[in-house]
Image (spheres, rainbow, N blue to C red):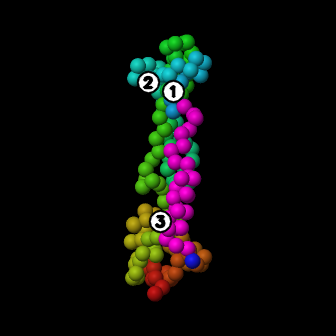
Amino acid sequence: MVDNEEIEEIKETKEKSTRKGKKSKRSKDKLRCTQCAYKINPVETPPNKTWQMISPLPDKMGRVTITIMGSFTCPKCGKSLRLAMQKIKSDSDASVVSRKQGLVTTIQELKKKTSLEEIAGKVGLSDKAVSKATSLLIKKGEIKGAIEDGYFVPEN
């Protein structure tokens, strides 16, 4: 049997063995000249030109990354540089939910007989698309219920 004192000793050794606050050797200054390593301050040395790059695909959380780029001239050596000034990720709340997932969650929340037109209004699809999609989802077994005369009847 293990005593409480032994458990606390084990916890203390685990806490000591974990590496907290490990500092990266990589420099935090991203705006540095590649030729002379001069630190460029965007306030003192404004960029010649700025533009935005939007990532073509979202990350696995569904967030889109926007990179703000800038063209600079190094005040020390005169080299022309293109540097990423800032990276912005959209909020996770703004992530895009697929139409199929939105339809499935809307239908699963239904507790009574509901018209397909009403479901289409909630999801933002046409009546015809909702009718086809619900019949396909019923056949696949992803949702339980039936379509009767333009109404979806959930299975109890």
Query: Was residue 25 drawn as part of the magenta stretch in this picture?
Result: yes
Residue beneath the point at 56% across and 18% down: 80
Query: Is tag 2's residue or tag 1's residue first in the polypeptide sequence?
Result: 1
Q: Magenta residues?
A: 2-27
Q: Is residue 97 above or below residue 37?
A: below
Q: Residue at x 46, y 87 (%)?
A: 156
What is the CA distance from the residue labelled 2 to the residue labelled 1? Answer: 8 Å
Residue 102: percent from left, percent from top? 47, 65
The kind of residue on which mark 2 rests is Pro
Number of the label disc, if any, that sits on residue 102: 3
Check the image and name the residue furthest to the top: 77
Label 2 Cα crowd, 10 Å radius (few <14 / some 14-19 / many 20+): few
Left or right: residue 36 versus residue 49 is right
Viewer-side label of 1, 3 = 1
Quadrant where the N terminus sits is bottom right
Residue shown at 54%/43% (left/top)?
Answer: 22
* Whether residue 90 can be seen here: yes
> Which secondary structure, mark 1?
loop
Q: Position of residue 54 (x, y in %)?
A: 52, 40
Kindly identify the residue that appears in the image at 50 percent across and 82 percent down: 145
Circle 2: element type: loop
CB under 8 Å between callouts 2 and 1?
yes
Q: Secondary structure at mark 3?
A: helix
Residue contact between numbered discs 2 and 3, judged by CB atoms under 8 Å: no
Tell me where residue 95 appears, x and y as whole percent. 47, 54
Q: Write down the residue under mark 1.
A: 31
Label 1 or label 3, whichever comes before in sequence order: 1
State whether residue 149 appears in this view.
no
17 or 151: which is nearer to us?
17
Label ID, residue 42: 2
- The numbered mark, 2 or 3, whose residue comes first in the sequence reads 2
Q: Is residue 119 magenta?
A: no
